[in-house]
Amino acid sequence: MCDRFAATGSHANMITYLTQKLNMPLVKASNTLSNFGGLSSFTPLAGALIADSFAGRFWTIIVGSIIYELGLVSIVVSAVLPQLRPLPCPTQENCEEASSLQLWPLYISLILTALGTGGLRPCLVTFAADQFDMSKSGIESRSWNFFNWHYFCMAMATLTALTVVVYIQDNVSWVWGYGIPAVAMGISIIFFLIGSPLYKKVKPGGSPLVRVAQVIVAAVRKNKIVAPADSGLLYENTELDASISSNGRLLHTDEFKWLDRAAVATDEDKKDSTSPNLWRLATVHRVEELKSIIRVLPISAAGILVAASQAHGFVIPQARTMDRHISHSFQIPPASLSIFGVITVLVGVVLYERLFVPFARRFTGNPVGITCLQRMGIGFAVNIVATIVAALVEIKRKEVAAKHNLLDKPTAATPISVFWLVPQFCIHGVSEVFLSIGHIEFLYDQSPESMRSTAIALYSLVTSIGHYTGTFLVSSVHKYTGKERNWLPDRNLNRGRLENFYWLSSGIQFINLIYYVLCAWWYTYKPLEVVNDNMEGDVELAAGEVLSKPLYDCKGNGDIEHARDETH
């Protein structure tokens, strides 16, 4: 929660700091934040690989937290020293931009927080999930969903930052506004260390990238070998896979059958079957690990364009041109408008858990209401609605500005309430309840247990690519829409055509939704073997599968007879 509080408090209003205090042009400021946001979403992949390979999640979180704290301190230094800022420019016309020397403390802060994020984001949710029984039976025995309530806690932290910290930044001091998140993060590191003896710490199972490479190399080496029709003849080694399959081994699937060649034991491989050369022979479990990752990639890729549509941050400059008064003496800070989206998430998670799931369960028979894929699909569709609403509101805002002859006065308050922007935030919040939580749960559930930090990092990687895609989209629109009626002008949004940008984004997302539906239609959930102490076999099915007959019987000698009939 402190990580999310610090991240939101330090970055939610940063576009205001860049444009109002460092006098950056709007598009440059937007692209700067998008680029560093992309870096922050890319580094978790490296952090996840370190955690899954050798460091473990606990120590990766510790090191990442310390680096993140140094980044927060750097931005405080930037806000404290006046020589690190250009002269004030209240008119926002002919402003002196911050010099390269003045920008370096900011860039150092952004780089350090991006590196620290690499250790935190992929490990926090998986480390928390490690403390609970996340098997299918364990999940069904609880009346609550871990991922729903994890996201609820994150939303509470975000809400606090958007209301308290952003208000302080706009109305009290940027030093205090950036200092409070830094202090909160420092305290959280101390408390996390104090709780160390209480945690369940899962040992790393070795580099997942190495295992993936071994399967690919083994399959390529045996490119002339034909895999047997009977998957029971493929190589299995329970002892070898013990450290990476404590929750059960992955069962063979018929997809990507060319990879099965890696698990074909040749005469040379059988010479030392107890300790095989893993660059020549892989177990079925290791082959299925790679298949599982390949299967989730197209689904996750659909999130790129959603992240791109939300990466630009133009809603804050919009809000600055509108009437933000709640009372005669109090104005809501532009960046605090996000609280309406966060409140929607908080309420939405509770309603989803307590009302939607029981209602949907009556029709689907699924203990969790609907599958992760169905949940994500609803989120994609709702996000398109939010973008359409944003376009309609921008049209209305400019109509009011034109009516009052304010199109050429970018700093003047247009007599239209800022609360016209609230519906799009609320609809985005509904989208998050379905899409973001569903995506994280899908990655955790469908990834191999030894690669879960890496899989969660995939969510951040999708966001990273989305940020860079958003930067490319904004830059291209700004470059190619001319000087006279540029869609995204540097200083005066009243003379821009932001609504056209939203229409373009809506069209792109609609095409993306069609792509996602096709990917979800053909997706195959992973089958997982679970064997209890008396050697009776059971199968843990992911949400969405219906078992029409026993998948296999596990005999005393460990042989498995497959009889699968899966319905998705």
Image (cartoon, rainbow, N blue to C red):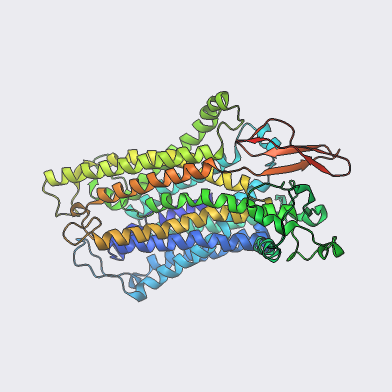
Q: Point out the image quarter for the C terminus.
A: top right
Measured from the top left, where is residue 492 in percent x and y? 20, 57
Please count the marks in the image: 0
Q: Residue furthest top?
A: 362
Q: Quadrant of residue 60?
A: bottom right
Measured from the top left, where is residue 183 in percent x and y? 50, 58
Instruction: Check the image and report above or below for 426 versus 202.
Output: above
Q: Is residue 530 left or right of residue 438?
A: right
Measured from the top left, where is residue 336 in percent x and y? 36, 47
Measured from the top left, where is residue 133 in percent x and y? 70, 41
Q: Residue furthest right?
A: 557
Q: Residue at x 57, y 50 (%)?
A: 296
Q: Nearer the viewer, residue 351 or 217?
A: 217
Q: Nearer the viewer, residue 108 or 400?
A: 400
Q: Is residue 174 left or right of residue 434?
A: left
Q: Nearer the viewer, residue 500 or 319?
A: 500
- Any part of residue 567 in sight: yes
Q: Residue at x 51, y 55 (%)?
A: 460
Instruction: Check the image and report above or below for 303 versus 55.
Output: above
- Any part of residue 156 in sight: no
Q: Is residue 101 left or right of residue 126?
A: left
Q: Residue at x 55, y 65 (%)?
A: 67
Q: Nearer the viewer, residue 401 or 208?
A: 208
Q: Quadrant of residue 441?
A: top right
Q: Is residue 529 left or right of residue 494?
A: right
Instruction: Check the image and report above or below for 124 versus 275.
Output: above
Q: Quadrant of residue 258?
A: bottom right
